[in-house]
Every structure is written in C-alpha cells, then in structure tokens.
Image (tube, rainbow, N blue to C red):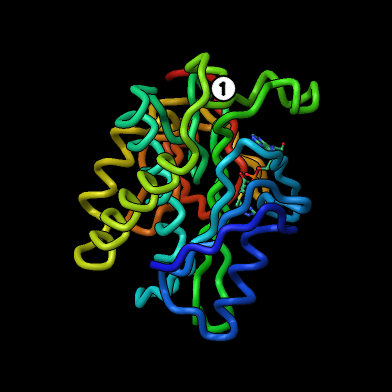
Amino acid sequence: MMILHFKEVDSTNEVAKKLAAIGAPEWTIVSSDSQTEGKGRLGRRWISPQGGLWISIVLRPDIEESRLPIIPMVSGISVAKVLCDMYGLPAKLKWPNDVLLKERKVCGILAEAGENVEYVVVGIGINANIDMNKFPAQLRNSTTTISTELKREVDLNALKIGLLDQFKEDYNNLIRQDFSILKEEWRHLSSTLGQKVKVITPKEIIEGNAIDIDGEGALLIEVSGRIKRIFSGDCIHLSNF
Ligand code: BT5
C-alpha cells in the first residue's frame, strides 16, 4: 500500500485517476488536507475544507462490470463500521453510498472507472473535524460531521488507517467470495430499507417502499404491488413504512 498525501489538490479522485492511468498499482492511495474542486456524483461539488478525510483508492478489480456498483457500497459498509468501532457512532447507510449519522450525511462516496474498467478509483469523503458553519446554510440540516456529533476532534491519521484496514478486509472478502455476506451487513446497517422513499433517476421519479437490494447493488422498491429495480439515482427517505 502506498499512501501519497498532499496539502491541497483539486480532487483526490482526479489525482488517483491520473496515477492509475499511467500504471499505479492497486492500493495506491491519494489523500489531501483539502480539495479545491472536490467532486460529488453527476458533476456535483463536494465541500472539502481542511479537517475532513478526503481519500481515493486505486483498485484493479477482476469482477463483472454489472457488479461494479457493489464496490462503493462496500466502501460505505467499511466507513459505517469504522465510525461505530472507533467512536461508538451509530452510522447508517443510505442507498446507494451515503453514510449517515442521525439521518444526516457524514460521508459521501464517488467511484469512477477507467476505460474498459482497467481501474476503479473509490473516493471517500468523511466530514471529520469540520465546524458546521463551514457548510452553506442550505446544507446544514442534512449534513453532519464527526466532531459535531462527538463534541471533540478525532485523529485524522488514525481514522485514515482504521478505514483503510477495514476497507481492505471488506474489499478482499468481496473479491474472494461474493456479495452475500456483505449484503447481509449492508442490510443490517441500512437506513433505507424499511423506508418509504423517493428515488430520482435520470429517467423518472419513483416513490415506493424500499424493500431490499439485489446482488448487483440495485435497490428494490415496491410500487403498488410491483417490484422495481433501480440501478442508480438519488434517494430521499420519506418515512418508515
Ligand atoms: C457524493 O456525491 O456524496 C460523493 C462525494 C465524494 C467525495 C470524495 S472526497 C475524496 C474524493 N475526491 C473527490 O473529488 N470526491 C471524492 P453526491 O451523492 O452527488 O452528493 C453531493 C451533494 O452532497 C452536493 O450536491 C451537496 O448537496 C452535498 N454536499 C457537498 N459537500 C458535502 C459535504 N462535505 N458533506 C455532506 N454533504 C455535502
């Protein structure tokens, strides 16, 4: 494992993708104190001031393309377990990849694949030691940080090492076995399952009961007695059903 740490970069995913494209081996890690162009999904921005853990991991998975969405889901499982194990925080998962504390987003994950899936870069952003006033007003109700929840700061390096250890174990389990054991963990940690949800996809807006995920990480939603499989989208939790 080689870890490259920067004071400031545009985006750790961008740096990691460039390294992966010129042959950086699996488990090359890029992290940075802050990001000037932190990226969310679908071209959105990710607020990345100093105090957060902004990290990207180069992977070279040998799995079917249809199962790629499972990789960021497994990263979410690792983050949730680490927040619980290291700090006793009851972290939950929101489909597809968010990690929540008390229904507020503490971590976002962005996976990007290279041409012909030569590599996958998993970018993980954890709001660790960040003051809530660093976030714009419209995000403050839906966001939280570890230091806000614990009322103390945490050691970023220890969090980084704890996360990488946990993710390595979970990822190797995914590659060695299949998704079934991890799927059970995802179900267990999920806040989405059991909720009435609204999912916004590029094609449609679906409202229904989130009942399960399948072996490719798709969300199964029951809409008037029929099951719909959703592969990607933005999920809003409405209420428990
Ligand atoms: C994500 O996108 O949640 C993926 C975020 C991935 C960030 C990591 S940091 C390391 C690596 N390098 C990068 O450049 N990116 C990755 P999405 O589901 O699209 O959520 C983005 C939305 O979350 C934004 O449009 C805001 O509404 C909100 N948001 C932005 N910054 C946030 C933050 N720090 N904490 C919580 N919510 C945030």
**Toward which corner of the image does residue 145 lie, by quadrant?**
top right
Instruction: Report x, y in % for residue 167.
Output: 35, 53
Looking at the rendering, the quadrant in which ligand 1 lies is top right
Can residue 202 be seen from the camera position used here?
no
Q: Quadrant of the N terminus?
A: bottom left
**Toward which corner of the image does residue 104 lie, by quadrant?**
top right
Foreground residue among 2 and 112: 2
At x 38%, y 73%, the residue is 61
At x 63%, y 59%, the residue is 12
Residue 42 relative to residue 128: left or right: right
Circle 1: element type: strand
| Image height of 155 relative to 133, above or below | below
Q: Which residue is mark 1?
A: 238
Foreground residue among 32 and 115: 32
Total numbered labels placed on residues in the image: 1
Instruction: Report x, y in % for residue 160.
Output: 44, 46
Amino acid type indicated by mark 1: Leu
